[in-house]
Amino acid sequence: MFSRTTTRRHFLGTILAASVAPAIVRAQAGRKLNVAIIGCGGRGAGNLAEIAANGENIVALCDVNANNLAAAAKKYPDAKTFADFRKLYDEFKDFDAVAVSTAEHTHSFATLPALRMKKHVYCEKPLAHNVWETRKIREAAKAAGVATQMGTQIHATKNYRRVVELIQGGAIGAVTECHVWVSRAWGLQSEEASRRNRDIVFVTERPKEAQTPPAHFNWELFLGPAVERPFHNVYFPGPKWYRWWDFGSGTMSDLGSHWNDLPFWALNLDAPLTIEASPGPADSELAPATMSATYEYGPRGTMPACKLTWYQGELRPAVWTEKKIPQWADGALFIGDKGMVLANYDKHILLPEEQYKDFQRPERTISDSIGHHKEWLEVAKNGGPTTCNFAYSGGLTEANHLGNVAYRVGKKIHWDAAKLECPGAPEAAKFLKREYRKGWELA
Ligand SMILES: NC(=O)c1ccc[n+]([C@@H]2O[C@H](COP(=O)([O-])OP(=O)(O)OC[C@H]3O[C@@H](n4cnc5c(N)ncnc54)[C@H](O)[C@@H]3O)[C@@H](O)[C@H]2O)c1
C-alpha cells in the first residue's frame, strides 16, 4: 500500500502518529469503525458513500441543510442526527472516526475537537481556512497520533505515482522549474469574462440586502465563525461560497490542493522561501478568477532549489502560450536539465517525445493505492501511514494559502515557517489568521 519512496516527512509524521497511540489503533483491529459524518451533501455525500462501502458503521450524521441530512438519514436510519457539530461533540462520544466535508471556514472547528478526542479524521481539502488554522491542525494531529487523511483522492491514482517515479528516478534530470495551470476561472472578474468563463455566479461586492434563506438551510450555523452578514444566494448553494475570502480561498487553495499535490510529492516540497503573486490589486471580499503565484524553494536533499509557478483562470505559462508543449487545458509541467514531464490527473508524457521514444521507464517503486478512503480506514484499524496525512497535506495546504497571502499583500513575501510570519511584511499577518464571529473561538 505504501511507497518505498514515501518522503521522510510523510513517513515520520505517520509513524510517529502510530507509535504514540498504540491503544487507539490496535484496539480497533478487526472490527468495524463507528464513523460520524459532518457535512452529508455535496462532496460529503461521496465521502459518506465510500466509507459506508467499506463496511463501516455510520453512527452519526450532521448537516446544516435539513434536506441533505434527511437524505443521508434515510440511508442510515440508525445514525443519530445533528445540525450543529458542536452538539455532536458535546452529546455523542461513541464514535472512532469522523469525516468532515463542510465549507472550508468551518473545517478547523469541526476537526480540532475530534483530534483532541483522539478520533481518526478524514477532512476534505483544503485542510483549513488559513495558514494559522492549518498549523493548529497539524500540531493537534501529531499530538493525537490518530489516522488522518485529507480529501485529495487524486493522490491515490496510478498516474500520480508514475509521475513521481519518473521525477524521483531522474528521468528528466535535476528539476529546477515546475508550472501548474488550471483553466477554471471562477471568482472576481468582469461580467464579460464571467460569461466567457461560464462562471457559476457573477458578483463583485458583498450584497447589502437580505434574502430569506431556504427553510431547509440553517444560515446561522453555516455562517458559524464567519463574519456576520444576511443570507444571500451569492453564497449558497455550494460551490458559490468558494470565492468569498470569509468562507473559502478561491481556486488557489481549492484546485491547488489537487494540482500542487503532484509537485509537492514528486519534488519533496514543504515550506517555500518566498512567494510572489499577480496580477493585483486584491479585492477585500472576493478571490480572483485569474491569478498566478510563484514559489521559490531551497534545495531538498539531493534536489536543487526550484521555482513552482501556479496559474489559474486565463493565465498559462509562456511555454504553453508559445505552443512549445501540447495545449492541455490543465496541467503540471516539470522542467529538468534533461527533459520535461507534462501531466494532468489522468495521463502524462515525457518531452521532447522524440528524445524519449525508446525510454525505459524506471522500475515501479510506489505500490498502488487500495483507495484513498480505504487507506485511511485501514490505517485507523491497523496502524501504519496514510499518504495524505495531516503532516503532509498540512504543508501543502499552508503553501497554497501562502499564494493567496502574497496575492492579498500585493508584494513578494518571505516565509518563516517556524515562526509563522512573513519577515518584512507585517501586513501579511491579517491574512495568515482571521477574526471569529462572537461566540466562536478556536483555542
Ligand atoms: N476532493 C474533492 O474532489 C472535492 C470536490 C468538491 C468539494 N470538495 C471539498 O469538500 C468541501 C465541501 O464542498 P462542497 O462543494 O461539497 O460544498 P457544499 O456547500 O455543497 O457543502 C457540503 C455539505 O456540507 C454541509 N455543511 C456546510 N457547512 C456545514 C456545517 N457547519 N456543519 C454541517 N454541515 C455543513 C452542506 O449543507 C452540504 O450538505 C470543501 O472543503 C470542498 O473544497 C472536495
Image (cartoon, rainbow, N blue to C red):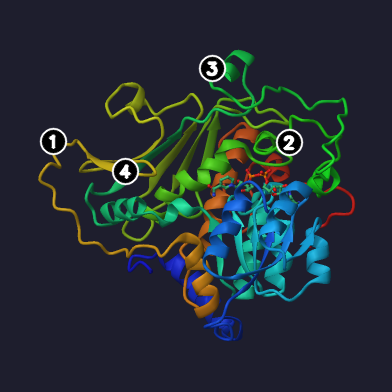
Say whether residue 442 is left or right of residue 120: right
- Give the camera-side residue of 295 and 388: 388
Q: Position of residue 329 (x, y in %)?
A: 40, 30
Image quadrant in which you'd find residue 47: bottom right
Q: Amino acid at mark 4?
A: Lys
Q: Amino acid at mark 3?
A: Arg
The reply to whether discs 3 and 4 touch (Cβ–Cβ < 8 Å) is no
Question: Which comes sooner in the sequence, label 1 or label 2?
Answer: 2
Mark 2–mark 3 Cα distance, whole angstroms, equals 22 Å
Residue that numbered label 3 is attached to: 196
Residue that numbered label 4 is attached to: 347
Q: Position of residue 303 (x, y in %)?
A: 33, 55
Cβ of mark 2 under 8 Å from ligand 1: the answer is yes
Of marks 2 and 3, the one in the foreground: 2
The numbered dot on residue 354 is 1
Residue that numbered label 2 is attached to: 236
- Residue at 13%, 39% in the rendered image: 355
- Residue at 74%, 66% in the rendered image: 113
